[in-house]
Amino acid sequence: MGKSACSTSPQQLESTCFILRALFLLLCCKHACCQCKILRCNADYVAATLNLRGSNKDTAYCNALRSYSHCTRKTARTCRGDLVYHSAVHGIEDLMIQHNCSKEGPTSPPRPRPPAPNHQGFESLDICNYEKNFLYKHGQPPTYQHCAAFGDPHVRTFHDEFHTCRVEGSWPLLDNNYLFVQATSYPVAKSSNATATGKLTIIFKNMKECIDQKVYQAEIDNLPAAFEDGSVNGGERPGGSSLIIQERTPGQHVEIRAAYIGTTIAVRQAGRQLSFAIRAAEQVARAFTEEQDLQLCVGGCPPSQRISRSECRHSGIAAETARLLCKEKLPVEDVYFQSCVFDVVTSGDANFTLAAHGALEDAKMFHPDAEKLHIFQTGVGCRLISLPFLLVIVISNLLAIQLCF
């Protein structure tokens, strides 16, 4: 018969029994005086010898025993008469003899102590850092989505759909458990369906652990760098700094960072219109109920409120001129370029080139997928009529009139 796998030498057995005895004393002897530190000595010894491996395990074991002995000597005065202490002292002497360990020599490095708990709180600090908290829970960073509203307004949804909207009056861009964003629009010109955003209201809803409810409101020629109550952060709560507002360009560009929900918002003014852009964590963007179904950032403009960008009504600037103006800011003829041409032609205001350009810059910063930055839609741009063709139409109409008489 072969040698049993469970057989051990008497020396190994005695060492193992001592470890078990130390563990038993560590777990069961709760009566030890609070001034006697022998339980800490036992715990350090057990931790140092529990997983010894390799060719130098005997040396490491002797180091651990010397550390154990040194620890008991330091606590000898306060441990007189303590059963656990005296059992440890005699056990150390026996084991040092059995393993031929000298009393003098190197010791084991001290066991690192766990950091003191932050009573201000993992609960209050990390829960107000959405990205860090998400990474801790899921083992990967969160995914993000981008939405924007600018110009006429044109809306780019979280799903990369692109609509040009009529939407005169107040309409919700977002309405979920964390945010409410409302845009109020006005007509850009008489006898035109086109509108532009003149007011934005953004409500950061109360989040008990992190922020007080905060309201930001912007209007044309009034782009404040503070919330309505005059503050520039989320308030006095422990996570108040997880919501901050910063002025990027005075009177033209404000950025609001809400780290507690993984969200960044940009508000701009260009000419006589306001624009809105957001980068939001996907779970935050989807946190709404069936009753909160009207959100332009989620579903785009209702079909009854959509208008075609090919329906350009001249208002002082010809389409050819508008194309040249927009080309300077937007070399790629995507939906941003088409929107720019539509807005300039419809409004007669060349400042709308800045609105489209700013929206594209925000998309570059906020959109999670650079390959989806540009959206191309065919057959929706302003129809261009060249001057020779226009003359042909005019002459043909005149001839038709003459023939009728």
Image: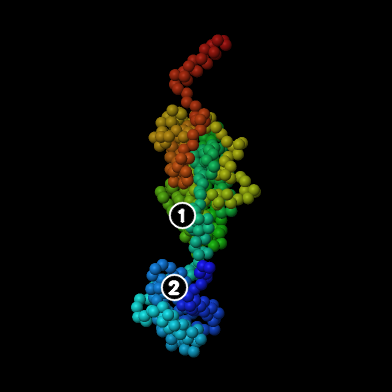
Nearer to me, 33 or 24: 24
Give the camera-side residue of 116 and 39: 39
User: Could one spot residue 380 in this view of the protein?
Assistant: yes
Residue 83 sits above or below residue 369 on the image: below
- Mark 1 residue element: strand
Q: Position of residue 357 (x, y in %)?
A: 43, 40
Q: Secondary structure at mark 2?
A: helix
Q: Residue at x 45, y 22 (%)?
A: 386
Q: Looking at the image, is mark 1 or mark 2 nearer the viewer?
A: 2
User: Dot 2: within a 10 Å radius of its alpha carbon, few (fewer than 14), some, or many (20 or more) residues?
Assistant: many
Marks 1 and 2, the one that precedes in the sequence = 2
Instruction: Give the vertical position of 248 relative to 392 (above or below).
Output: below
Q: What's the residue type where badge 1 is placed?
A: Ile
How much space separates mark 1 and mark 2, taking CA atoms? 51 Å
- At 46% from the left edge and 54% from the top edge, which residue is drawn? 245
Q: Residue at x 40, y 37 (%)?
A: 329
List the single residue furthest toward the front.
1
Find out whether the residues at labels 1 and 2 contact each other: C-beta distance under 8 Å: no
Residue 51, how many percent across, how many down? 46, 69
Image quadrant occupied by the C terminus: top right
Q: Amino acid at mark 2?
A: Ala
Farthest right residue?
A: 291
* Residue 361: percent from left, percent from top: 43, 43
Q: Which residue is mark 2?
A: 48
- State the image coordinates of residue 54 (x, y, percent, origin top left): 41, 67
Q: Nearer the viewer, residue 7 or 227?
A: 7
- The answer to whether residue 71 shows anywhere in this view is no
Tag shown at residue 347? none
In the drawing, does residue 273 fall left or right of residue 328?
right
Q: Which residue is mark 1?
A: 245
